[in-house]
Image (spheres, rainbow, N blue to C red):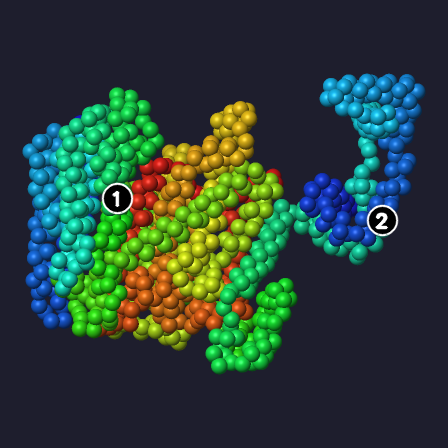
Amino acid sequence: MIKKLLSKQETKHQLKSSHEYSQASFTWVISLTLTVILLLNSFDFTGGTIKPWVFTAFAVYALFTIIQIIITLLIRRDLRSQGEIRRSTRILGYIQLLSIVTGNLFTVTFGFNLIKKQKPPEYTIAVYMLLTQLFVIAVSALNLFKPYVSNTFLPAMATLLIMAIIQLVALILVARYVKTNYAHPRMIWLAFPIILTAVTGNIFALVLGINLLAKIRKNGNPAMTRWGDVWVKLTANQTAMSGLFFVVFLFCLSVSSLFTFDYSIAIDNNYSAILQPPSLAYPFGTDNFGRDLFSRIVFGARISLIVGFASTAIPVIIGGVLGAISGYYGRHTDNIIMRLLDVLYAIPGILLAIAIIAAFGANTVNLILALSVGAIPTYARTMRANVLLVSTFEYVDAARAFGSSNFSIIFKHIVPNSLAPMIVKSTLTIGAAVISTSSLSYLGLGVEPHIPEWGNILKIGSTYLETHSYLAIYPGLAIIALVLSFNFLGDGLRDALDPKLD
Amino acid sequence: MGGTEAARPNRLISSISSTYSKILLNPSYRYLLLLLGAPVNLVVFLFYLVQRKKDDYAAAENRIRSEMLAAGYLEALRTEIMEQQKRKHGFFKQKVNEGQLRQEVDKIVQARFQEVLKERTGKELKLNQQKRLTMADTFGSLIENPLFFIISLIPGLLMYILIFLYSNPYLKYILERLVMTVFVIFGVAVLVFTILHLSPFNPAANILGETATPEQIAAFNKMHGLDQGYLTQLWNNIKGIAYFDLGKSFSGNEEITSSIARKFPITLTLTVISLIIAIAIALPIGIISATRPNSFFDYTFMFVALLGLSIPNFWQGLIFILNFSIKLQWLPATFNPENWLSMIMPVIVLGTGLTASVARMTRSSTLEVINEDYMITARAKGLGKRTILMKHAVRNAIIPIITVIGLQFGGMLGGSAVTEKVFNISGIGSYIVDKQFIPDIPAIMGGVVYTAITISLVNVIIDILYAFFDPRIRSKMKQY
C-alpha cells in the first residue's frame, strides 16, 4: 500500500518536473483551442455553408493537434515506465516540425524542444530567430497576390531569404557545437554574421550573437553571469518566449515592411475596391476608401511600437532619475520631490493626457509626451523604494569610503543594482501604453487621423460595425495580441529577474 | 467616589500639559501651536520670563560664573586661544594685524566660555536633581490652576483642539492625511489650469468662427475673464472649484458645475456597480487559484485574467454591441438611465480590467501568505480548511488587494471616458472629451479636478480603513 502510494507520488513528481511534459500539455491545449476557433469560423452560420479555405486550415490544425495529443500521451507513458523520454518518442518531434507550414508557433517550438535532449539557451534563441525570419518572409510574401508590389520588394525578399539560410545554418551549428557550459571557439566566426542579420530588426539574432560571444569568452568557467542566468530562465518559459516572439516578429516586420510593403496601398484611396471582403489580394479586406486593411495594420504596428516604447522610456528615465535622487538624498529633497509627484499621481493618466492634448493639439509627439507625464510618478516610486533598499548595502558604504562623489555612487553603484524592478514594470506597462494610444486615437485625441494607426483603423471600423465588422475585429485582435505578448513577457521577466515587487 | 471625580480633570490637565510639551519638541507642529494659541502663549511666555529670573538655573549659573572668573579661567583661556590662532596664521602664512587678531580671539573665547559654563551648570543641576525651567513647565504649572484653564479656554480654543488632535494618534494621522489631500488637490488645480493656460489655441476664435471681428473676440474674452492675468484667472478658477461655481461654459451657455453635477453621478454609479461586481468575481477566483497553484483551473483563470488586462475597453464594447445588440438583439446598444438592461454591457466592459488585476493580485498575495509558519500552526491546531483560509490567509493577504482596488478605482474613473463614448453615456468622461476640442478651459478643469478630488478622497478613506483593518498598521501608527 505504502509502496504504491510512494510510487504514485514519484510519478506525479516526475511528470511535474519534466519540462517536456508540461510544455506538451500546454501545447496541445493551445493547439486545440486554435483548432476549435478555426472550426467555428469555417461555418457561415447565416448561410449554412462551409468556407473551404478555413475548413482546410482547420483540418490541418486538427491533424497536428491529434499528433500532439499522441506525443503527450507517449511522453507520459515513458516518464511513468522509465523516468525519461525514449529516443523513439523524441524522434516524433520531427513530425511536429512540419507544422511550420500551418504557422502554428506552439507545435513547431515544441517539436524543436522535443528533438533535443540538452537545450542550452542559445539553441532556443536560435530556433526563435529562425522562426521569426520565416514568419516575416511568409507575411511579406502575401504581397505577391497584390496587383502590384513595391520596387524594393524583390531584392528585399532575396535578402531576407539569404539571411534565413544563414540563420538555418547557424541553428544547425548551434545545435551541434554549443553545450550548456561550452561553445566551440570557432563559433566566433558564426557570431558576427548572425549579429549582422539583426539589421532587419530580428532581436533574437542580436541576442544569440552576444550570447555566443559571451559563452566563448568564459569557456570552461562554470560561473553564471546575471545576463546568462536570465536567458536560461526566460528560454525555459514557453509563454514568455511566445510573447517575446510576437514582439520581435512585429518589430522585424515593421522594419522589413519599409522595403517589402507598399505604403501607397495602405493610404491611397482606391475607389474601385471599396469595402472588399477578405481575399488573397486583401487578406483582411479593404475599408471605405478602398485601402488594404492588412497593409494598414502592418504599418500601424510601427506607430504602436514607437509610441509604446517612447512613452515608456521617457518616464522610466525621468522618473528613475527623480526617484534615485529622492531615495538617495532623503529628508527634504525626498519630501519635496515626492510631494510634487503626488500631485501628478492624483490625476488619472488618461484624463491628464486628455487635458494635455486639449491644450496642445492632437499629434503623435504630443501623445507621447502626454502619456509620459502621467507615468512619471509610478516609476519614481518604484525607483525610490529600490534605491532606499540598495543604498543600505555595504558596497555603497565602501564606495563612499573610497571618496566617490554622490553622483558616481548613485549612477555607478546604486542605479545599476536597482534596475530589475524597473525593467519588469516597464515591460508590463508598455502594453498599457499601447492600449492608451489606441484608445486616445479612437477618441480622436491621439495620432493624426490620416496615419494608419490601430486606433484610427478601429475608429473607421466602428462605423461599419453592422455591415463590415471585420474592419473593427482585425485591428482589435492585433492590439490584444501585442498587449498580451508584452504582459506574458513581463510576467516571464518578473519570474526570471525575481525582484521583490510591491 | 470623590477621589475618582477629582482625578478625572487632573488626568485631563496632565495629558494636556504633557501633549503641550511634546508638541513643542516637534519641529513642524511647534510653530502651528504657538500661532494658534498666540494669546495664551503670550501670557505663558510672560510668566516664563518672570519665573526664569528666580529659577534655580539662573542662581546656579551666576554662582558658577563667578567661581570660574575667580579661578582666572578666562585669562588662561584667552592666552591659550591667542597662541593657537597665532600658530594657525603662521602655518597658513596669513598676515593679520593686531586689532583683527584680538577681535577673533575675543569671539572664540566668549563662545567657548559660554559653552563651558552651560555644561558645568547642567552638571551641577543634575547633581542636585534640579531642572531648568522650560516654557512647557510654566504652562503645566499654570494650567493646574482651574481658573487659568477656564479663562484660557476661549482665546486658546484652537490650540486646545490641536492638542486634543495631537494626543490621539488616529486623529493626528487622519488630520495629516486630510491636510496632504488638500495640498494635492490645490496642486492638481494649479497644474491643470497651467497646462490649459499655456495652450496655443484661442477659444474665442474657435467658438465665434473665422468671421469674428476683434471687438467680438475682445468682448468674449472680457465676458469669460480671459483678458486678466495668469494669477487672477488661476485664483478665480480655484475659488470657483472651492465654491462649486465655475461660471458659464464657453459654448452652449450652461452652468458648468450644474452640468458636472448632473453627469458625475451617472459615471460614479456605473463605476461603483462594476467595482462591486468585479470584486465579487475576482476575490473567489484569486483565492481558488491560489489554493491550487499550477493546476488547470489556475492556468485557465490566470490566462483569462491576462486576456482581460489586454483587451482595450472600446474594442470590447464594440464587440459586445456587435454580438449582443446587432446580431442577437438581446441588449440595447446605447445607455439609457431608465433601462437597467442597458447598464449590463457598460458595467462589464468597465469592470473587466479591474476584475483581472484584482484576481491576479489576490492570487499572488494569497500565495505569499499561504506558506507562512502561522498557516502550518493553524493546520496543526486542527482548524478547518475554511477557517484557515478565511481567517488566517485572506485576512493577511487583503491589504495589498485593497491598495490595488483603490488605485484601479482611479484608473476606472479616468478611463471611463472611452467606455462612455462607445455606449453613448453622458457621463463626466465624455463631457471632458466633448469640451476638449474648443478647448473649454473651465469645463475641462472642473471635470478633471473634481474627478481627481473624488479619487483622492477615496484613497484617503482606504488609507484610514487600513488602520482599522490591520492591527500591525495600528501599532506602528501609535509608535509614530
Quarter location, residue A370:
bottom left
Residue drawn 48% across and 81% down? B211
Quarter of the C terminus of chain A within the rendering: top left
Report whether residue B196 is seen.
yes
Residue carrying label 2: B43
Which amino acid type is shown beneath numbered disc 1?
Val
Quarter of the N terminus of chain A within the rendering: top left
Horizontal and vertical percent for residue A198?
A: 25, 42
Quarter location, residue B429:
bottom left
Which amino acid type is shown beneath numbered disc 2?
Val
Horizontal and vertical percent for residue A439?
A: 36, 62
Residue drawn 63% across and 63% down? B231
As displayed, is residue A307 above or below residue A230? below
Count the numbered circles shown.
2
As displayed, is residue B471 above or below residue B341? above
Residue carrying label 1: A199
Inter-mark Cα distance, 1 to 2: 81 Å
Local packing at callout 2 (Cα closer than 10 Å; few below 14, some 14-19, many 20+) is some
Secondary structure of the residue carrying numbered label 1: helix
* Residue B154 appears left or right of A66: right
* Residue B11 appears left or right of A71: right
Residue drawn 19% across and 63% down? A284
